[in-house]
Amino acid sequence: MPDPAPTPRPTLLQIIQSVLAAMFGVQSERNRERDFAHGTPSQYIIVGLLAVLLFVLILFGVVRLVLSLAGG
């Protein structure tokens, strides 16, 4: 029986989707298997750190906006 066609490495968009899904805890089993089989940890670590940094900056901006509106 011939081997099935190899799955290509995940694209940047797929990595971002996987990281965001993992942050919310809704990652599908199929995507998780693809990530572990064909992705490299460094890709997910870098995208994860950038996603967390972006989240913190957005949260910081929202808090500053609310405080400025409340104090004005």
Image: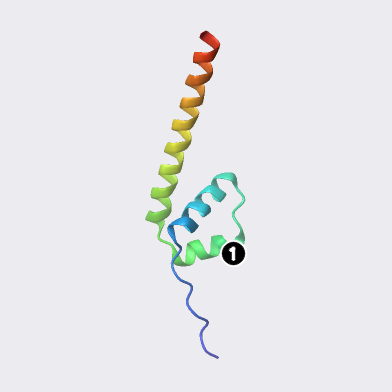
Q: Is residue 46 left or right of 17 when viewed as pictured?
A: left
Query: Which residue occupies the foreground of this view, 33 or 20?
Result: 20
Q: In the image as oriented, which residue stretches furthest toward the bottom?
A: 1
Q: Is residue 55 left or right of 28 when viewed as pictured?
A: left
Q: Residue at x 44, y 31 (%)?
A: 57
Q: How many marks?
A: 1
> What sort of colour scheme is used for the picture?
rainbow
What is the quadrant of the N terminus in the image?
bottom right
The residue indicated by pointer 1 is 30
Q: Residue at x 43, y 62 (%)?
A: 39
Question: x, y (%) of residue 14?
Answer: 49, 58
Q: Amino acid at mark 1?
A: Arg
Q: Residue at x 54, y 64 (%)?
A: 33
Callout 1 crowding tier (Cα within 10 Å): few <14, some 14–19, many ≥20 = few
Q: Residue at x 41, y 43 (%)?
A: 49
Query: Which residue occupies the foreground of this view, 68 or 16?
Result: 68
Question: x, y (%) of residue 67?
Answer: 51, 15
Query: Which residue occupies the foreground of this view, 15 or 66?
Result: 66
Q: In the image as oriented, which residue stretches furthest toward the top?
A: 72
Q: Secondary structure at mark 1?
A: helix
Question: x, y (%) of residue 64?
Answer: 47, 20
Question: x, y (%) of residue 37?
Answer: 48, 67
